[in-house]
Image (cartoon, rainbow, N blue to C red):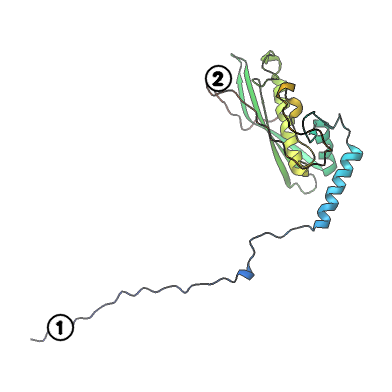
Amino acid sequence: MKQPKQVATNNVVHLQKEVTTNPSSTSSLPDLIITSTEAKERIDKLQKFVKTSMMRGVDYGSIDGFSKPTLLKPGAEKLCDAFGFSKTVDVINRIEQWDVGIFSYEVRVTLSNKVTAVVEAEGIGSCNSKETSFRYQDPFTIVNTLLKMAKKRALIDAVLSATRTSGLFTQDIEDFPKQDRKGGDAPAPFTTSSTVIFSRSIFSSKEATCTCDKSSKT
């Protein structure tokens, strides 16, 4: 009897053709949108505005031990007007424990272009009743002060980012008690580009329970 013919099957794996990319056709770095000459002109105009339109001791202040002056609220508002920014303020986090007198506020300030409505920058600022400056005061009488202080810090943070003036100014060092002002550099002209970084301590979670309010505005 004739045996049926067996048909062998092969498992064929089709390999995709390797695609090669010409390195010269792509770039890993973004293109500059302004020339170095234009960037220098902007910096020169900004420095001229600071020298001619902003007052030391009112718009910004020098603190012994720090190389850059601190930008103050009047100066931040003046820069907002000069650059044509509108401000939106949101309280994004708050702790209010009236039974024990513990208060903390975190505020976000958004700066937008008045003409195009494009968001230019956001700043975050916080303040709480456990800070050294407020720790020994009656906490129930400084609630509004804490909120306004958080708003001011957020505003200055946003202005420094939006106007690219962090190379000229720092912030908040005027709020530190003198014994906490530890800087290694002697005062220098505000054109220096050194950076000063600060950290603020906040009370532990054992002392307070955080209650958030994402929609409150001031």
Q: Position of residue 14 (x, y in %)?
A: 39, 74
Label annotation for residue 124: none
> Label 1, on which residue?
4
Question: Considering depth in this image, is 178 or 47 the residue closer to the camera?
Answer: 178
Which residue is at 85% across, 45% downward? Answer: 46
Q: Position of residue 205 (x, y in %)?
A: 54, 24
Question: Considering depth in this image, is 146 or 50 the residue closer to the camera?
Answer: 50
* Residue sitting farthest toward the bottom: 2
Residue type at the position of mark 2? Glu
**Number of marks in picture:** 2
> Label 2, on which residue?
207
Question: Which of label 2 and label 1 is nearer to you?
Answer: 2
Mark 2 or 1, nearer chain start: 1
* Residue sitting farthest toward the left: 1
In-image side of 185 versus 108 (left or right): right
- Badge 1 element: loop
- Badge 2 element: loop
Residue type at the position of mark 1? Pro
Q: Residues within 10 Å of mark 2 (few under 14, many from 20)?
A: few
Which residue is at 90% across, 38% downward? Answer: 53
Depicted 10 relative to depicted 205: above or below: below
The answer for how far apart the CA atoms under marks 2 and 1 are is 87 Å
Q: Position of residue 206 (x, y in %)?
A: 52, 21
